[in-house]
Image (cartoon, rainbow, N blue to C red):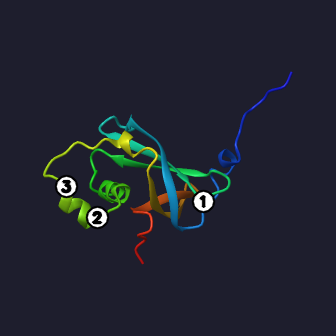
Amino acid sequence: MALLIHVTKADLMKNQAITPGWKEAEVQEVYAKMSKDGQSTNYWVKLTFTEDADGRNIEHNFNSKALGISLQNYCAAISGKTVLEFMESMPKETTLDLESTIGKKLMVKIKNEIFEGRPVNKVEDFCPVGKVPF
């Protein structure tokens, strides 16, 4: 009897290092999940690299207790604005619809780190397509 496992090349390459730097990506999926300690919510975005022939992707989260860390960069990138432009156009209070970002393209800065003795890919920053800061 055969034991069949459906797998993609991207699945098998998940733990291989991605060359650090700016990559164009598209938002594929968003979801929320409670943190391990149950004290906050992690808002996850799954990003697929548009120029990766193998369909590799990366996930990044925004924690409800620290939304200012990179959420403004993500929102600015999705809207095609700089962080300053985005923050100046934002009202004092708003509700963000993370699901509305599905299908949007942005630039993602990748870095490599070592976690528990193995390399992992991390998102370091976001910016609009065509506006990579140098």
Looking at the picture, does residue 128 appear above or below residue 41? below
Q: Residue 90 carries which label?
A: 3
Q: Distance between the residues labelled 1 and 2?
A: 25 Å
Q: Position of residue 32 (x, y in %)?
A: 38, 37
Q: Name the residue under label 1.
A: 51
Task: Out of 119 and 57, give the one closest to the viewer.
Answer: 57
Classify mark 2: residues with Cα within 10 Å, few (<14), some (14-19) or many (20+). some
Q: Name the residue under label 2.
A: 83
- Whole-angstrom CA distance, mark 3 to mark 2, is 10 Å
- How many numbered marks appear? 3
The kind of residue tagged 2 is Val
The quarter of the rendered structure image containing the C terminus is: bottom left
112 sits left or right of 38 in the view: right
**Could you tell me residue 91's position as x and y percent?**
15, 52
On screen, residue 42 versus residue 119, left or right, reads left
Q: What residue type is labelled 1?
A: Glu
Farthest-out residue, top: 1
User: Reading the chain from its start, which is encountered first: label 3 or label 2?
Assistant: 2
- Sequence-wise, the earlier of marks 3 and 1 is 1
